[in-house]
Image (spheres, rainbow, N blue to C red):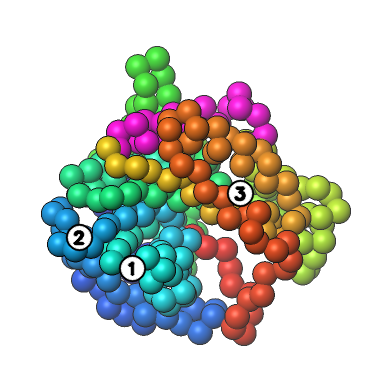
Amino acid sequence: MSRQLVQYHPVLGHLFVPGLKVRVPHETGGHLVQTNARGFRSRHEFAAARTPGLRRILLFGDSFTVGDGGVDAQRYSDVLETLLPATEVYYFGISGTGTGQHYLAWRKYARGVEADHVVIAVQPENIRRTASAFRLNMDPGGAQVYYPKPYCTRGPAGLGWHHQPVPEGTRTAEELPEGARADVGGRLRAIREAVSALGVKDLVQRVTGFQPLPEYDRADSQEWPLMREVLLTWIRGVSQPLTLFHVPLHQYVEGVADPSGVQARLRDVAAEAGAAWVDPLPEVPTQPLQHVGPQAPGRAA
């Protein structure tokens, strides 16, 4: 997601430019991006009071919920709205973000919004984004830089939020504070890029049994307790019925990696907090994804 479409946000790190209406070039052919006055890619202007005669769902997530690379009508959020009569879906998706930022977006923009249901869409990689103080991205000139972002830690008193307000500007790798965690888009980045360049990524992952997110393999892993605490805090703060929705990695959809750890952790936290749990994987045929366009699209932000 180009940083030219977004602007600095002191709480969330970044957000779409409000009132945007622009066609964005993409490997899949390009698409229209239109944002509301709050800076979310939504056809609806968000109102606190319920719309007479309509049910309302609040939906939170990352670029998969935003629909990076696709038109509005192809997003699962828009499809949901068409499938449910007399229902409006408020889309609070933010590209390139983690579950912690989605929780902060709920606190700032949605806590007082009347609704019938809340959906938290969890893309499993968010377990890393939530704990990272910086995120690797490209600046408008195409250089790789690190953008500060909000992050949280877990202590005896509960969650502690840092980078509030989020520092402005960018950092080079040499300028990162010592010990700072940065989200660089996954494990073994240099090896993954080399394998991808050779066009044998899926074959290598299938043969080696590569696990993209071992953080979910154990309930007592180093990373999961923080992610669990963020989800529990959020779910317990919501007064409406809530659904935790698993947005599976493409490796899980294509059957080249084992999703059972992710499924177990998210299912258990939903049960612990009294939320519903939805996992689309059992309904998705295990087969290679069919990409549309001149070349396979890159990973979503």
> Which quadrant would residue 43 be assigned to in this image?
bottom left
Disc 2 is placed on an element classified as loop
- Looking at the picture, does residue 182 appear above or below residue 292? above
Q: Which residue is mark 2?
A: 46
Q: Which residue is mark 1?
A: 85
Crowding at mark 3 (Cα within 10 Å: few <14, some 14-19, many 20+): few
Q: Position of residue 186 (x, y in %)?
A: 61, 49
Name the residue type under label 2.
Phe
Mark 1 or 2, which is nearer the eye? 1
Q: CA distance from mark 2 to mark 3?
A: 34 Å
**Does the stretch in magenta take in 207?**
no
> Which quadrant would residue 198 be assigned to in this image?
bottom right
Q: In the visual, does 296 lie left or right of 238?
A: right
What number is the disc on residue 186?
Answer: 3
Looking at the picture, tell me which residue is in the foreground, 114 or 190.
114
Q: Position of residue 39 (x, y in %)?
A: 25, 62
Span shown in magenta: 216-238
